[in-house]
């Protein structure tokens, strides 16, 4: 799991919150959960919204980052904040809703993980997932090129970044044996960002952290300059100074069958 910088992560909060709200809007209207988990809850905004929407529920937010959880605890006392890894998630009671927004791309082996999360649901429970689509295209591809081709390649070779996102059909196949309803879609958000290096700034909060931590100060500067040069060619600022930043995300809302 990546190490997070809450201050930098918060800079683009309104862009990051929109997919979470879109996922929340897609929850079945009749759902009335009593046991809710927000996995990879970050600074806690979505867990708090879930607690407000479902005041009858016990809401727990789980995250591996103490810094993020410190921010989350300041938001609400009505959510139980728990430090832990999604890989080891094992609820003490079946969940009526498992919500996870922009976290699972940091967790490996989705072929095992996704059915395990579905199996943790109570009958008719809902699994709601949003995952950034990590592939070799666009800005992530240019970052991978810089990591692999620079003089720092040996230092960065074994660092585990965000994993590739499986095909939508795979998520369906993993969930269908356990879930009576599986809804899957993708959305590409075209963010209009301002600033000198907005894509670099965006990724400083999480994506870049493990790589920068492995380099000394001189290497970091050269590394970032090399990536900026590639980004400038692929994502040049428009005439109005805006950098258009396409960001594709995969959504899944699945409802477990009525009998366990």
Image (cartoon, rainbow, N blue to C red):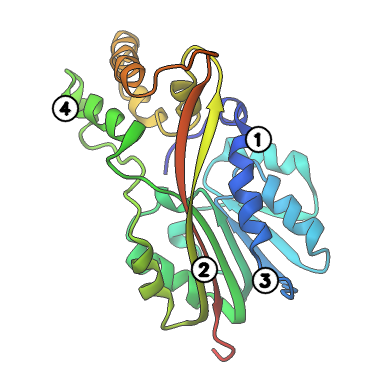
Task: Name which of mark 4 and mark 3 comes first in the sequence.
Answer: 3
Tell me which residue sits at (36%, 45%) in the image: 134
How far across and down, in percent of the image, does residue 157 sit? 20, 34
Tell me which residue sits at (79%, 60%) in the image: 53
Task: Name which of mark 4 and mark 2 comes first in the sequence.
Answer: 2
Report the residue marked by disc 4. Answer: 154
Distance between mark 1 and mark 3 Cα atoms: 24 Å
- Discs 3, 2 touching: Cβ within 8 Å: no
How far across and down, in percent of the image, does residue 164 sit? 31, 49
Q: Which mark is residue 28?
A: 3
Distance between mark 3 and mark 2 Cα atoms: 24 Å
Report the residue marked by disc 2. Answer: 90
Quadrant of the image occupied by residue 195: top right
Left or right? Give the position of 119 relative to 157: right
Quadrant of the image occupied by residue 28: bottom right
Tell me which residue sits at (65%, 35%) in the image: 14
- Viewport quadrant of the N terminus: top left
């Amino acid at each position: 799991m990546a190490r997070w910088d809450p201050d930098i992560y918060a800079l683009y909060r309104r862009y990051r919150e929109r997919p979470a709200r879109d996922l929340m809007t897609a929850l079945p209207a009749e759902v009335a959960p009593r046991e809710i988990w927000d996995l990879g809850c970050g600074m806690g905004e979505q867990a708090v919204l879930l607690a407000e929407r479902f005041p009858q529920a016990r809401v727990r937010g789980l995250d591996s980052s103490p810094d993020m959880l410190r921010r989350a605890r300041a938001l609400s006392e009505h959510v139980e904040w728990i430090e832990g890894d999604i890989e080891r998630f094992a609820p003490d009671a079946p969940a009526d809703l498992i919500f996870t927004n922009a976290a699972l791309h940091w967790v490996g082996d989705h072929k095992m993980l996704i059915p395990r999360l579905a199996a943790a649901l109570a009958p008719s429970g809902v699994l709601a997932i949003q995952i950034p689509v990590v592939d070799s295209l666009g800005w992530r591809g240019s970052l991978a090129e810089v990591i692999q081709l620079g003089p720092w390649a040996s230092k960065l070779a074994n660092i585990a970044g965000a994993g590739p996102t499986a095909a939508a059909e795979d998520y369906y196949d993993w969930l269908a044996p356990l879930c009576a309803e599986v809804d899957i879609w993708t959305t590409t958000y075209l963010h209009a960002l301002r600033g000198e290096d907005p894509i670099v700034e965006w990724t400083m909060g999480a994506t870049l952290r493990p790589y920068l931590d492995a380099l000394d100060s001189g290497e970091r500067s050269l590394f970032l300059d090399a990536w900026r040069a590639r980004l400038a060619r692929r994502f040049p600022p428009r005439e109005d100074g805006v950098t258009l930043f396409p960001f594709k995300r995969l959504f899944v809302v699945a409802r477990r069958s009525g009998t366990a």
